[in-house]
Image: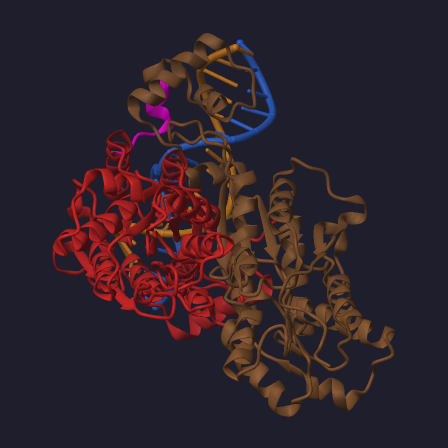
Chain colours: A brown, B red, C blue, D orange
Amino acid sequence: MTVTLADVAARARVSPATVSRVLNGNYPVAASTRERVLRAVDDLDYVLNGPASSLAAATSDLVGILVNDIADPFFGIMAGAAQTQIGGPGDGSGRAGGEKLAVICNTGGSPERELTYLTLLQRQRAAAVVLTGGAVEDPAHQAAMTAKLVKLADAGTRIVFCGRPPMPEGDALVAALAFDNRGGGRRLTEHLVSLGHRRIGYVAGPPERTTTRHRLEGHREALRAAGLGPVPADEERLTVHGPYDRRSGYEATLEILRRAPDVTAIVAANDTVALGACAAVRDQGLRIPQDISVAGFDDLPFSVDAVPALTTVRLPLFEAGARAGRLAMGKENPPPGGIATIAAELMIRGSTAPPRG
Amino acid sequence: MTVTLADVAARARVSPATVSRVLNGNYPVAASTRERVLRAVDDLDYVLNGPASSLAAATSDLVGILVNDIADPFFGIMAGAAQTQIGGPGDGSGRAGGEKLAVICNTGGSPERELTYLTLLQRQRAAAVVLTGGAVEDPAHQAAMTAKLVKLADAGTRIVFCGRPPMPEGDALVAALAFDNRGGGRRLTEHLVSLGHRRIGYVAGPPERTTTRHRLEGHREALRAAGLGPVPADEERLTVHGPYDRRSGYEATLEILRRAPDVTAIVAANDTVALGACAAVRDQGLRIPQDISVAGFDDLPFSVDAVPALTTVRLPLFEAGARAGRLAMGKENPPPGGIATIAAELMIRGSTAPPRG
DNA sequence: CTGTTAGCGCCTTCAA
DNA sequence: TTGAAGGCGCTAACAG
């Protein structure tokens, strides 16, 4: 019923082996023969059987990209960028040549689903896996992840981290692109301190994620350097954790304002959260930045359109994603030591200003 | 080297067929035998070979979700929702049971890449394909798409459209969830007309997409119904096409303002474009909504946080995506006639008001 | 309920 | 540069 490689071979009057060779392009074939085969492929409208091919070759052309939340542009931008490097340009015919199938897997932030996806990818004998965004720091989960990744690597799957710190062990088997979340967080708070802010509320992400911890550590580093900390009671009072979404930003900000009506600035875990924070500040009848400064993190595309435009920390998401894609394809060499730190740039805009009085 | 099903069979002292049966759970097996097999699987840390399985069964557990631009939350939300219905809940062990591998493919809006992805998915013998968002109306491309989809369907792949109108032909082979873009566009403009607006600029999407055309048609229907059209010269002057991004919204709005300084409202093709339009209006020293009303489409999460909050048309993206996922899994029956129209709801917020004077 | 037996379609030595 | 042949690991009848 369906056309097989043998059918193509028959029509081109060559052996199946020859057809395989021209299709894979990894072995010398006479130009005239290749012509003939290609014509037969077109005539018959042949499509390679991926599973059969993967079975025989013990590897597939699948590349998995794991993200925590694909509805969040933070991940969408990185994942899309990675795919541009992996999918190949296409030949305009839709015929699909040597391209890999770059594929995004949405874990929803769940450790279980993360492992499940890795198993599924392992099952498919994926050529590479790109893990994006912050990792969960639960030791049991980390151990399970490490074990799984070691197995994948052993089976020949290339592992790339993007916007995620390297694992405690097994660094050797991956290339990691880590964002400088700590440095970015520090510079952001330094900026606020330099404006004169002394009491700063912090809307943090979920406590178990590396991203959350690193950004918060940077924030507190800056406070300490300015002689404003640590005052444990204060730190706790001024910090509220929650998911990386708008609603959490809204509610956490109300909570902070209730606990400490004298705060003059709110730093949010990311731009989406910051948007919620802005809404909460306004709903309390306060003005930004005259009464309260607000800052975010990531510099997502909408942040410049907030009113006032959001002060934030820019992460080169597209560039990092593209580089991760290239690493996954083996088009680019891993950074020295396997890990590269990606700089974060402070973007000062209208949502931050000196405190009143 | 790697553990195979035969190894498991040997350790559990059963035949390979029995192991296969407990793994696939689609055939009666004695409880005690199943126990033994499962233990052997765990002991050996066995992972099914996907390609071999797909080859033998002539189908795989891959489900492809095609999107135009994964960095755009419009698609991210739909795709993420679809994945929740496809990936399965996971069993908490990361072992991966009967789950499908739901996988997002980013076409970048390119017709070639759309076809390439379909070929790749066809090659993998995908169980289902979900196509999201507006289609390109080029006849050659539509013909190629139809042909490709027919082949996929023939091979047993389930086809689902989500937020995309059904194809001119071959309706029978798909389930389609179409957004009421025309109705939404009409009601939005009716709202502006009822406020008293008479000269309304329109920042449209790329001309070749169905979404663009339908929304624009709704807009013009409303104008005509109000006795404000058609005036071809005006329509052309007040409409500017461009990509679905912020920058296009910004530039197109400047252009409209230049061509027709007397417009009192700008309707944007979607919320992202509307954000750019807002920025342009402000940069011209005009106030929203006092001097110019602005409206969007989609009601993405950030739209309510715009200042003033954006009047827009809400599309139930998450619900539609989830339903598409269920259709792709065969968990839900296709709508009668294979096509369902999803209602669009007008959301009136602060960015629209009566024109001055 | 369980075992036996053929392939599924392709890649990859090995020869020619 | 090309052909021949074996096997990749699993599933799906068919017996029992």
Q: Residue at x 49, y 63 (%)?
A: B13
* Front residue (pair B21, B303): B303
Task: Say if B67 sits above or below B304 in the image.
Answer: above
Q: Residue at x 43, y 61 (%)?
A: B80
Q: Residue at x 17, y 41 (%)?
A: B168
Q: Position of residue B214 (x, y in %)?
A: 23, 49
- Residue A268 painted magenta: no
* Front residue (pair A273, A310): A310
Q: Position of residue A13 (x, y in %)?
A: 36, 13
Task: Say if B106 sits above or below A293 in the image.
Answer: above
* Region in magenta: A1-9
Q: Quadrant of the C terminus of chain B?
A: bottom left
Task: Say if A247 sits above or below A184 in the image.
Answer: below
Asked whether residue A126 is in view, the answer is: no
Q: Residue at x 29, y 23 (%)?
A: A44
Asked whether residue A344 is in view, the answer is: yes
* Front residue (pair B149, B202): B202
* Front residue (pair A157, B50): A157
Q: Position of residue B83 (x, y in %)?
A: 41, 61
Find the residue positioned furthest to the front.
B357
Q: Position of residue B212 (x, y in %)?
A: 29, 46
Quadrant position of residue A212 = bottom right
